[in-house]
């Protein structure tokens, strides 16, 4: 038995809506069954197409209105962040000896931990920059400087220096208010 043209068109139309293209309209083939009957076969190919203009209207992003808020409602708690820096650096580095490869990994780990703990304070509208430096204590001196443009009324930083018998660590958290 062959499918009627109307059934073929309906099937192709439904499959196109679902994201598939039917090969029934262009390639019909029949497979012989053991008893001499023929059976219609339908193959489909999935596709992904760019949305049309009609579909774009239904998926528009939500536009947020301006708050006209020029300053933070809650200032950044520098004292609490200093305690976080002290706790994290002490817990991670108290018993460690300086090894270059280990310290490279520790700077990444410590900066991620500090960033997560400061984000847990949920201070709105502040961007965070966390920098951790770890070096060997061998009687040398180091000068670490950083520069940026910021508003001294709203933007601030917290810093802590840790030392043990073989290494030093400097952790800085810079907070910039996002208007």
Image (cartoon, rainbow, N blue to C red):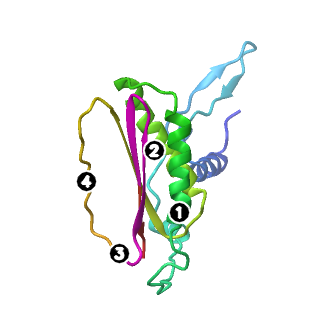
Q: What residue appears at the point 44 percent right and 84 percent down from the top-left corner?
A: 70
Query: CB of mark 3 within 8 Å of CB of mark 1?
Result: no
- 6 vs 118, left or right, is right
Residue extending farthest to the bottom is 68
Indicate which disc, 4 or 1, sits on the residue closer to the N terminus. Answer: 1
Classify 10 Å Cα crowding around label 4: few (below 14), some (14-19), many (20 and above): few
Point out the stretch of residues depicted in magenta: 151-172
Asked if residue 105 shows in the view, the reply is yes
In-front residue for pair 127/47: 127
- Say which mark, if any, is on residue 152: 3
Residue 101, percent across and down? 37, 24
Indicate which disc, 2 or 4, sits on the residue closer to the N terminus. Answer: 2
Residue where numbered disc 4 is placed: 145
Indicate which disc, 1 or 2, sits on the residue closer to the N terminus. Answer: 1
Query: Of helix, strand and loop, which one carries label 1?
Result: helix
Residue extending farthest to the right is 35
- Give the number of the mark in front: 3 or 1: 1
Alpha-carbon distance for marks 3 and 4? 17 Å
In-front residue for pair 149/7: 149
Query: CB of mark 2 within 8 Å of CB of mark 3?
Result: no
Residue where numbered disc 2 is placed: 111
Indicate which disc, 2 or 3, sits on the residue closer to the N terminus. Answer: 2
Q: Quadrant of the C terminus?
A: bottom left
Residue 141, percent across and down? 23, 40
- Give the number of the mark in front: 2 or 3: 3
Residue where numbered disc 1 is placed: 79
Query: Of helix, strand and loop, which one carries label 2?
Result: helix
Indicate which disc, 3 or 1, sits on the residue closer to the N terminus. Answer: 1
- 14 vs 73, left or right, is right
Please tell me whether residue 55 is drawn above or below residue 137 in the rendered image.
Answer: below
């Amino acid at each position: 038995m062959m499918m009627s043209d109307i059934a073929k068109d309906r099937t192709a139309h439904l499959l196109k809506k679902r994201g598939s293209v039917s090969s029934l309209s262009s390639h019909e083939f029949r497979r012989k069954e053991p008893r001499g009957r023929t059976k219609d076969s339908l193959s489909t190919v999935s596709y992904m197409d760019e949305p049309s203009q009609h579909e774009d209207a239904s998926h528009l992003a939500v536009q947020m209105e301006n708050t006209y808020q020029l300053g933070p409602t809650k200032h950044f708690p520098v004292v609490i962040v200093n305690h976080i820096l002290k706790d994290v650096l002490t817990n991670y580095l108290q018993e460690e000896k300086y090894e270059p490869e280990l310290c490279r990994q520790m700077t990444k780990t410590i900066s991620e931990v500090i960033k997560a703990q400061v984000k847990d304070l949920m201070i709105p509208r502040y961007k965070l920059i966390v920098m951790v430096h770890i070096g060997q204590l061998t009687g040398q001196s180091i000068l670490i400087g950083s520069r940026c443009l910021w508003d001294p009324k709203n933007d601030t930083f917290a810093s802590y220096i840790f030392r043990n018998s073989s290494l030093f660590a400097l952790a800085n958290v810079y907070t910039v208010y996002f208007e």
